[in-house]
Image: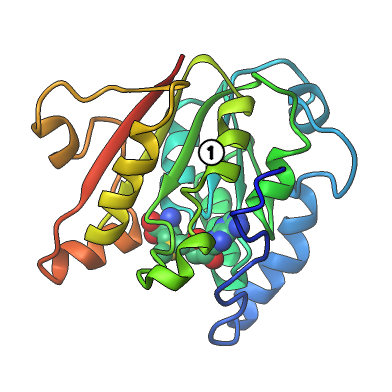
Amino acid sequence: MKDPTTLRRLYGRSKGRPLRAGQAALVDRLLPAVAVPAEGPLDSRRVFGNERPLHFEIGFGAGEHLAYRADLLPDHGFIGAEPFLNGVAGALAQIRDRRLTNVRLHMGDALEVLERLPDASLGFVYLLHPDPWPKARHAKRRMINPGPLDLIAAKLEPGGEFRLGTDDPVYCRWAMMMMSQRRDFEWLAETPTDFLVRPGGWPETRYEAKALRQGREVWYFRYRRR
Ligand SMILES: C[S@@+](CC[C@H](N)C(=O)[O-])C[C@H]1O[C@@H](n2cnc3c(N)ncnc32)[C@H](O)[C@@H]1O
């Protein structure tokens, strides 16, 4: 990623409360079985053993959206990246409980995995409730910035979809401004309800539920890669 204006470092926490014994055992046992290969170029064949449509989720949190989508589309391959250990443990529990065989996880930076995928290889990229970094002096830490967007654009196939959800009004305006400057993405909203109402096939995530409980608004964006 060549964008000098985006800071390329992981911010935020990678550990929260200690894992319960069952969660720790799950991380020890299941994570190695579903982890994205640690090094080298990645493609559908290397990750899933065959050719299949690929989806990628940046910062999957506790994995509810990733698991829901993977359950819905069992012939597709889902790769998710999340540096937060407690979130990874949550996603592993979903993989186990739903018996999913089409999900691979990376505990760490999503951009590092995206860079290793072939260009034009992804059908969908999801970025749901990214850390807002609301202070202007932290704007370079936001995932919606030219560098990460260039990478997402490069990895999406033409006609592929980028879905963004946020409950932060600063981030919402920022994202609209950043995305409106791009010629490689077409905003799929035709009426305001398209971004005020959660589209079908887009389940509620933990952060979304929290925002709605606290009376905040949530915005849903769908962009098509030109
Ligand atoms: C506000 S939470 C939202 C989690 C989830 N998407 C949801 O909607 O419930 C943002 C998440 O992005 C993760 N994150 C931040 N930087 C990341 C990066 N470079 N790669 C992958 N995940 C990242 C954080 O660890 C955090 O779990």
Question: How far across and how far down the image is residue 74, in percent?
Answer: 53, 26
Question: How far across and how far down the image is residue 70, in percent?
Answer: 50, 35
Residue 99 visible in the current orientation: no
**What amino acid does circle 1 point to?**
Leu
Q: Nearer the viewer, residue 39 or 17?
A: 39
The residue shown at (45%, 46%) is 127
- Find residue 154 and report its image quarter: top right
Above-or-below relation of 35 to 198: below
The residue shown at (59%, 19%) is 53
Above-or-below relation of 192 to 110: above
- Find residue 215 and report its image quarter: bottom left
Residue sitting farthest toward the right: 40
Is 95 left, or right, of 189 in this rendering? right
Question: How far across and how far down the image is residue 93, in percent?
Answer: 55, 59
Categorize mark 1 by other alpha carbons within 10 Å: few (<14), some (14-19), many (20+).
Answer: many
Above-or-below relation of 124 to 92: above
Q: Nearer the viewer, residue 32 or 120?
A: 120
Q: Quadrant of the N terminus?
A: top right
Circle 1 sits on which residue?
Answer: 149
Q: Nearer the viewer, residue 122 or 85?
A: 122
Is 39 left, or right, of 5 in this rendering? right
Is 1 left, or right, of 218 in this rendering? right
- The secondary structure type at the circle numbered 1 is helix
Is 58 left, or right, of 85 in this rendering? left
Question: How far across and how far down the image is residue 157, in percent?
Answer: 57, 17
Q: Nearer the viewer, residue 150 or 206?
A: 150
Above-or-below relation of 46 to 212: above
The residue shown at (57%, 77%) is 13
